[in-house]
């Protein structure tokens, strides 16, 4: 969790122009821009934009051929209407919101809060609380949550070596650990470890729902086999905390990890001889806070305390670290501002495909993601930020295309509905806020400036005085 570096003697104050690898740029455009067939039907090769109205009228008149749109055409039309309206309140809690996540079909939203609360909301039924969970043996906060692919089980972690499992679809709306329902504990520590020997920062289910992978403060990656009910893989993966780990694709064979040692690593579970990674990717100058896979086993993104998001291609990884890791500056992201002179420092062996700058990563492990395939063709990267915005970047151009602004404190996490044009942001001000692509800005239910606050405890204290 720490980020200390020596101060640079020299730093280039001029930012480098944005660049991106041609192949990933081309693949992203194919998914998110009108097909050649559609372009030819409308403009006979001329490079012009097509409006949503133009796409619809072209289909009605038969110009788009076969009477339908390609998936790329649909993504192109949808991404012209980003979820920037609002926000509306999903929930208003008396503790900081740390994590949030839509289910794979978008019907459920799960959010975890500091303290011992997790709430599951019915996104198809007015955002009503589907399940209110009081967690078991929690240390400090809910550090991560993960829904199984079949949406039957919820895994949650905290700063302890145990992941707990809850039945999401049971009949009880209130789930109090080991009182109203059993929260099974999956133990990741060794027999000789004490009860709080390490904390878990990252939890993910495999695509088949049979395994859970975690990254922890013991510098390790562990995989738990739910059928065998035991830890099946232990990897001493990094030289510092493993803040992020995820499955690369549906096969479950490849893992991506990110650590406070500044490195991203790729692990092939089919050949884990001597705990050696399949490859290492260098380019970040500080600890990695989160990793999100594009889902193709090739590309992923990482968020970092060096205030950047980087896009990676695993085919460019090295067998080992090239040279010594540079140490440019001396600071601690938990309580200090990022050094201005370090903002445009560059790793001498940067292997990333692109770098996205503008958001802020301070105080906590801020998360970033690719936007959904269905509605945007993964054209965007979006992230929470310490400066109280949700940032949306264009993958191809590197531009900040939108900044969602309302919250009064750090936005640690945010989640984009897999099919609808909806984003939910979770902030340390205690709010879960919902942003939509359409809606009446004069709607009385839209959150206003009068409802803003920097801390959920300020409201609690005010309420207490009024009682």
Image: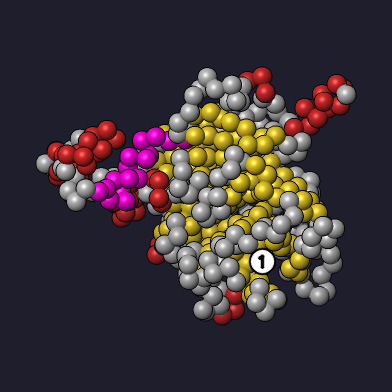
- Across and down, in percent, residue 10 comes to 52, 39
Q: Can residue 24 be seen here?
A: yes
Left or right: where does residue 301 sit relative to residue 466?
A: left
Figure quadrant of residue 454 = top right
The residue under the point 74% across, 62% down is 164
Question: How many numbered circles does the render carry?
Answer: 1
- Across and down, in percent, residue 311 comes to 44, 51
The quadrant of the rendering that contains the C terminus is top right
The residue under the point 74% across, 58% down is 199
| Disc 1 target residue | 220
The residue under the point 45% across, 60% down is 295
Q: Residue furthest left?
A: 44
Of 82 and 2, the residue lying toward us: 82
Is residue 18 depicted above or below 233 in this figure?
above
Q: How crowded is mark 1: few (under 14 residues within 10 Å), some or many (20 or more)?
A: many
Visual colour scheme: secondary structure
Is residue 376 depicted above or below 203 in this figure?
above
- Across and down, in percent, residue 252 comes to 52, 70
Judged from the image, the secondary structure of the residue bearing numbered disc 1 is: strand
Q: Does the magenta stretch include residue 165?
A: no
Q: Can residue 265 be seen here?
A: no
Q: Is residue 72 magenta?
A: yes
- Across and down, in percent, residue 406 comes to 59, 27
**Residue segment shown in magenta:** 68-83
Is residue 71 depicted above or below 212 in this figure?
above
Left or right: where does residue 458 sit relative to residue 354?
A: right
Of 380 and 465, the residue lying toward us: 465
The residue under the point 57% across, 63% down is 150
Of 39 and 26, the residue lying toward us: 39
């Amino acid at each position: 969790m720490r980020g200390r570096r020596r101060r640079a003697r020299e730093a280039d104050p001029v930012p480098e122009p944005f660049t991106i690898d041609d192949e990933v740029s081309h693949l992203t455009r194919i998914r998110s821009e009108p097909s050649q067939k559609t372009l030819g039907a409308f403009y006979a090769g001329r490079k012009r934009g097509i409006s949503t109205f133009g796409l619809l009228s072209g289909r009605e008149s038969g110009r788009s051929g076969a009477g339908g749109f390609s998936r790329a055409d649909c993504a192109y039309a949808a991404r012209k209407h980003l979820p920037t309206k609002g926000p509306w309140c999903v929930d208003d809690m008396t503790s900081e919101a740390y994590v949030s996540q839509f289910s794979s079909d978008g019907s459920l939203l799960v959010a975890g809060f500091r303290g011992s609360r997790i709430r599951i909301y019915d996104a198809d039924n007015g955002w009503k609380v589907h399940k209110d969970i009081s967690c078991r043996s929690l240390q400090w906060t809910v550090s991560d949550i993960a829904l199984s692919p079949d949406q039957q089980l919820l895994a949650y972690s905290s700063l302890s070596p145990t992941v707990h499992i809850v039945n999401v679809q049971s009949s009880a709306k209130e789930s109090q650990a080991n009182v109203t329902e059993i929260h099974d504990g999956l133990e990741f520590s060794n027999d000789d470890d004490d009860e709080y020997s390490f904390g878990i920062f990252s939890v993910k289910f495999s695509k088949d729902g049979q395994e859970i992978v975690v990254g922890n403060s013991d510098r390790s990656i562990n995989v738990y086999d739910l059928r065998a009910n035991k830890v099946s893989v232990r990897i001493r993966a990094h030289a510092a905390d493993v803040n992020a780990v995820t499955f690369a694709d549906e096969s479950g064979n490849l893992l991506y990890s990110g650590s406070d040692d500044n490195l991203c690593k790729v692990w092939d579970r089919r050949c884990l001889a001597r705990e050696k990674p399949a490859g290492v990717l260098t380019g970040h100058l500080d600890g990695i806070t989160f990793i999100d896979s594009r889902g193709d086993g090739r590309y992923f993104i990482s968020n970092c305390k060096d205030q950047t998001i980087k896009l990676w291609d695993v085919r460019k990884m090295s067998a080992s670290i090239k040279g010594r890791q540079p140490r440019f500056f001396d600071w601690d992201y938990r309580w200090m501002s990022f050094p201005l002179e370090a903002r445009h420092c560059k790793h001498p062996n940067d292997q990333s495909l692109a770098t996205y700058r503008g958001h802020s990563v301070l105080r906590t492990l801020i998360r970033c993601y690719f936007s959904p395939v269905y509605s945007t063709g993964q054209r965007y990267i979006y992230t929470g930020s310490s400066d109280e915005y949700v940032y949306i970047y264009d993958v191809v151009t590197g531009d900040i295309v939108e900044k969602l602004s309302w919250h009064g404190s750090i936005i640690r996490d945010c989640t984009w509905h897999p099919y609808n044009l909806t984003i939910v942001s979770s902030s340390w001000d205690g709010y879960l806020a919902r942003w939509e692509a359409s809606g009446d800005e004069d709607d009385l239910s839209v959150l206003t400036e009068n409802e803003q606050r920097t801390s959920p405890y300020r409201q609690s204290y005010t309420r207490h005085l009024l009682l």
